[in-house]
Image: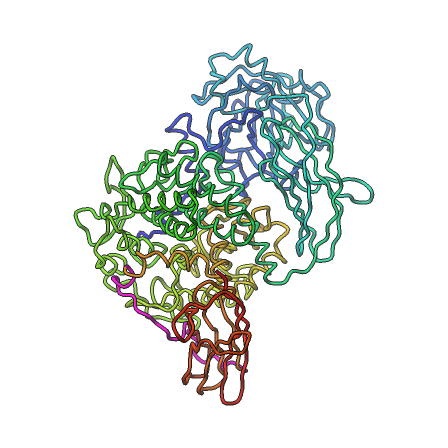
Amino acid sequence: MRTASTIRRGRPLHALLAAVALVLPGFGPAPALAAGVRLFRDGTGLGFWDLSWGASSGGSTVELANGSKFPVDDATRWRGTSALRLRFTPAAGGDWVLGVANAGWAPFDATALDTVVWWAWSATALDAAQLPDMLLEDQSNVRTPRQPLSIYNPGGLPAATWTRLVMPLAPFRLVPGSANLSLANKVFFCQSATGAAGVQRTLFLDELRVVDDDPTPPPAPLAARATGYERHAEVQWDAPDPAEGVESHRIERLVGGAWTAAAWADAAEGGGVLWLGAPGVGCTLRVVAEDWSFRESAPSPALETATRPLADDEFLDMIQRATFRTFWDAAHPVSGLTRERSGSGDVCAAGGTGFGLMAIPVGVERGFVTRAAGAARVLKVLSFLATTAERHWGAFPHWIHGATGQHVPFLGPSDDRVDLVETAYLAQALLAVRAYFDGAGAEEAQIRALATQLWEAIEWDQFRPGGDTSLWWHRSPTTGFTGSIRVEGWHEGMITYLLAVASPTHPVPASLYTTGWARNGAMANPNSYYGHRIYVGPAYGGPLFFAHYSFVGLDPRFKRDAWANYYTHNRNHALVHVAYAVANPLGRAGYGASAWGLTASDDPAGYGVHAPYNNDNGTLAPTAALASMPYAPHEALAAARHFYDAYGAALWSWHGFRDAFNPGAAWTAPGWIAIDQGPILLMIENHRSGLLWNRFMSNPEIAPALAAVGFVADSSSTVDAPAGAPAPAALALAAGPNPSSGPVTFALALPGAEAVAVEVFDLAGRRVAVPWRGALGAGRHAIRWDGRCERGALLPPGVYLARARTASDAVTARIVRVR
C-alpha cells in the first residue's frame, strides 16, 4: 500500500532543492547576504557534500565521494563538525576540478563581493606553487578562466597549521570569459600548471565563503550573559545589526589562564551552547564577534556561570525554551513563517508554520516572550498567509517561499500541488490561536478575524474528485488530481477529516470519516504487541508521529469513536515502542527502556520513516519519545533525561535536541526539522497544562464535528494494563495537567478492587466536587474532572486539594487552577 508516510516525507531536502534548482534557475533557499555567501560550514553526516561536483581526466585524479561529490571529513576541521577533504594527484597533460555550489545551487552576485576566503590545513608544508588554481562558474555552467592561488597566498600552507587563504575576485572580473558573474553559483578548485606531477596532496578546507572584505573589525557583542543548566551552559547576547557585518560569534572559555575557543554560533542565533558534561561545573566565558572575513571584535566582559541539577519542571522548561527558538528566532524574517529545517533558508513549511503558530501561546504562557510580542508575530504570519502566500481552493502548498509566498516544489521539480494534510495542520493552528488571543485590543481582534478568514476559505469539498468517498491528499491547479492519493487511515492525517467535517463554509459529509478515513473499518487492528492493544493501523502501531501531528490540538482524552479511544491507543502505541526498545530484537546499539522511539526523521543515509521491524536502522529521534509525554510521561521523561545525559554533547543544541541520532553508526543529525520540533514543544505543554488541547477544543466547530463522525464520551480507564501486569502496590493519586485552566485527569492507582471516592476540597477544607464515587477494579484508572463544583459552576483560580479515599486508606494531591 502506498502510504502517507512515503509520500509526505520520503526524500531529503537537499536532494529536492538540487532538483528544483536545475529546473528553476534563480531559485534558492538562501539568498546572498550583503556581506557574503557561505558555501560550506559543516557536513550533513552523509560523508560527502551534496552541493558539489568534480571530475578528472588525462591521468590526473581527484578524490570523489558518492560518484562526483566533495568528500567530507569529520576528524580534521577548523571549527564545527567537519571539513571538506581535497585529495588530488596532478598528471602532465591531465586535469581535475572539484567545486562547491551555493545553497540550493542558487546564484549570487559575485560582482558585489570581492574575495573568496577559507581556512586550509595540510599535514605537510606546501609552498605556494603546489596550491591549486581556482575558477568560478555561473548558473548556466559557464566557467571563467582559472586563476592561480599561489599569487595571492605567497606563503603557501605551513605544516599542520590551519591557515586563512584568499582569492580576490578582481582577476575574474577583469577576465570573466563568457561567465555571467552576477549569476555565479559555484567556486571550483582545479589543477594548476605549477603543481608537481605525480605527487598526491591532501588539503582540508573549512568555512568556504565569498565575501565583501571590509577591513573594519566588527563591534563587540552587547549585553552578553550566561546561564548554567544541568550539563551545559548557554551564552546569549543582543543580536547585532545586519549592517555591522557580523557572521558569527565565538564563545571562549578561560582554561589554565588562557582563553580557548569553545563553540561558535551564527550571528542570527543570538546565543550558543557550551557542553560541560556534569552538574556542578563552573566556568568563565566570553564572546567574540567575527565578521565574514574572519576579522574579530574586542571580547565581551567575562561571564561566570555553573551547571546545577535541575528538577523535572526546570528540565522541561529548559527543553521547551530551547525548542521554542526554532519557531521564534529562526522564523523567516520577512513573513514569520517556520522554515522547513535548519539551513533551509527561504523554504518554509505549511505544517511547520502551523506548529510555529501554536508555539507562540506556549512561549507567552511560559514567559519566553510577552503577549504583545506573541500577538504581533502571529498577526505578521496570518497577514502574510492571507495577502501574499499562494493558495488554491484555500489550501496551501507543502513548502512555501518565505519571502515571496509562492509554492516551492515538494514532490518533484514541476510540482505545483497544494497539500490538504499540511493545510489541516495549519488550520488546526488557526483555530488554536483564534481561541487563545481573545483579548479586547485591536491587534488580537485582527488575529481572530484573519484566522477565521483563512479557516473559512479552505474548500475541503474540492478535494473529492468526482464526489469520491475519500478526501485526496494533493490537488494541482494545472494537473488536477494526477499523482495524488486518498487520505486513508491509519496515519497522521486524522485531523484532516475532522476539520473538513467541521468547516462552516465548505464541509464534507460526516460519512467520509467512515468511508474514507476509516476505510469502512479496514483501518482497525485487533492485535496486541508486547501486551499492549493496538486498535488501529499497522502492526506495532507504526512510526510515532502518527500519535502526534493530529493531536497537538485535538484532545484524545475521554472520548472514542467506533474504533478506539485514541488516548488509550496512542499511549499503547508509545508503550509498544518502549517494549520494542527493551526487547531490541534487531540488536541495535543503545536501545533500552530510556532510549526508545522510532519515527520519521533524518538518518545516516539521508531521511527515512522508521518503525518497529520496519526500516529500523538504529536511528532514534527525540521527538518520538518527547512528543509522547502526554501518553507515557514517566517513560518519555526518562528518555529525555537519558538523551540529554548520555548523548547531549552532540545531540543538544541552541534549538534543543537535534533531529535524530544513531548510536551504532556514531552519527548525529546536524540540525532540526520543524515538523519534529513542533510536537516536542506542544505535546510537552499539553502534558503540563493542556494549553493547546484546551484552546483548540474550545472552538465551537469542534464538538459538533466530533459528534457527527461518531465520537461519544468514554470515561473508562484510559490505560490498558498489559496482560498479567501486577496491581499497584499502594493507593496513589496524581493530577494532570497541573496547573490547568480546563479539565483535569486524576491518575488513580488502586491496589485492590474496592469502593473509592475522589473528592476535591478548597483550602478551607470545604468539599467542592466529587469527580468519582463507586467501585473500581484493581489497577490504574483515569478519572476526568471538568473543573466544576458540585453546583455546575467553574471553580475560580486557586489551589485545591484532591483526595482519594478507600475504606482503609487515603492519599491527597495538590491542584492549581489558573485562568
Q: Which quarter of the picture shows residue 290?
A: top right
- The total of numbered circles placed on residues is 0
Residue 53 higher or lower than 665, as above or below? above
Q: Is residue 710 magenta?
A: yes
Question: Residue 590 occupies which quadrant of the picture?
Answer: bottom right
Answer whether residue 262 is magenta in the image. no
The quadrant the N terminus occupies is bottom left
Q: Which residues are magenta?
A: 705-730
* Residue at the extreme top of the image, as rendered: 174
Image position of 149 with respect to 354: above or below: above
Q: Please say whether residue 616 is visible from this viewpoint.
A: yes
Q: How is the image coloured?
A: rainbow
In the image, residue 816 lies at what x, y percent?
A: 53, 67
- Of all residues, the one furthest to the left in this rendering is 466
Residue drawn where x is 25% and y is 35% of the image: 478
What residue sits 38% from the left and 34% below the top?
405
Q: Position of residue 460 (x, y in %)?
A: 26, 48
Q: Nearer the viewer, residue 799 or 5?
A: 799
Q: 337 left or right of 172?
A: left
Q: Residue furthest bottom?
A: 807
Q: Is residue 14 left or right of residue 282?
A: left
| Residue nearest the observer in this picture, 445 or 241 | 445
The answer to which of 50 and 528 lies nearer the viewer is 528
Q: Position of residue 149 (x, y in %)?
A: 64, 19
Question: Residue 808, image x and y in percent?
Answer: 52, 89
